[in-house]
Image: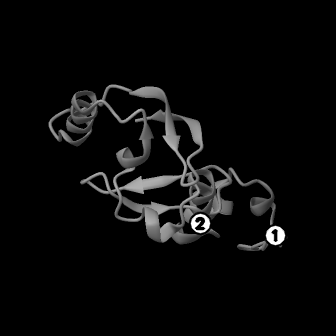
Amino acid sequence: MVERRKFGSDKTEASANPRSSEAMEHFTHDEIFRVMVDDSPLPVSIQNNEWKFVFVNEAYCRYTGYPVNELLGRDPKSFLFPPEDNARLVQKRLQASDLTNKLLPEYSAVRELVRKDGERVRFHVVL
């Protein structure tokens, strides 16, 4: 059963229009994060500066077949297929972490990962 959450007052005109600034005042940052990321039907992950998972939502767990405790602290390159080209991966990660680089060139690719059950699935990554 899906839990429905009610934030703010649904009787105001502002809450009827979620794009209005008044409607957004009813949400805390935690509630916005939960609605947009944690409860998203799309797989979402957040990595730290060492490229290790610090957050994965439930959709990400379903997509990869791994439970949260097997993903947190792990580098996602460990289940890419074919194994990530180390030179290209190192280059992209250096670009992303280079604080002197004002604009990060967009990196977009279709990759495959190996799910826990061994099935390969495609995903689109944009950095």
For label 2, the residue is 34
* Tag 1–tag 2 contact (CB < 8 Å): no
Q: Nearer the viewer, residue 104 or 117?
A: 117
Amino acid type at circle 1 is Asp
Colour scheme of this structure image?
one colour
In the rendered image, the residue lying farthest to the left is 100
Q: Residue drawn 65% across and 56% down?
A: 40
- For the C terminus, the image quarter is top left
Q: Nearer the viewer, mark 1 or mark 2?
A: 2
Which residue has dot 1 on it?
A: 10
Q: Which residue type does callout 2 highlight?
A: Arg
Residue at 61% over, 68% down: 27
**Cα gap from disc 1 to disc 2, whole angstroms:** 19 Å
Question: On the picture, is 106 further left or further right than 15?
Answer: left
Q: Secondary structure at mark 2?
A: helix
Residue 20, percent from left and from top: 68, 53
Q: Is residue 127 left or right of residue 8?
A: left
- Closer-to-camera residue (111/107): 111
Residue nearest the observer in this picture, 35 or 81: 81
Residue at 54%, 54% (x, y): give it. Answer: 116
User: Where residue 94 appears, x then y in whole percent?
Assistant: 20, 37
Q: Is residue 100 above or below residue 15?
A: above
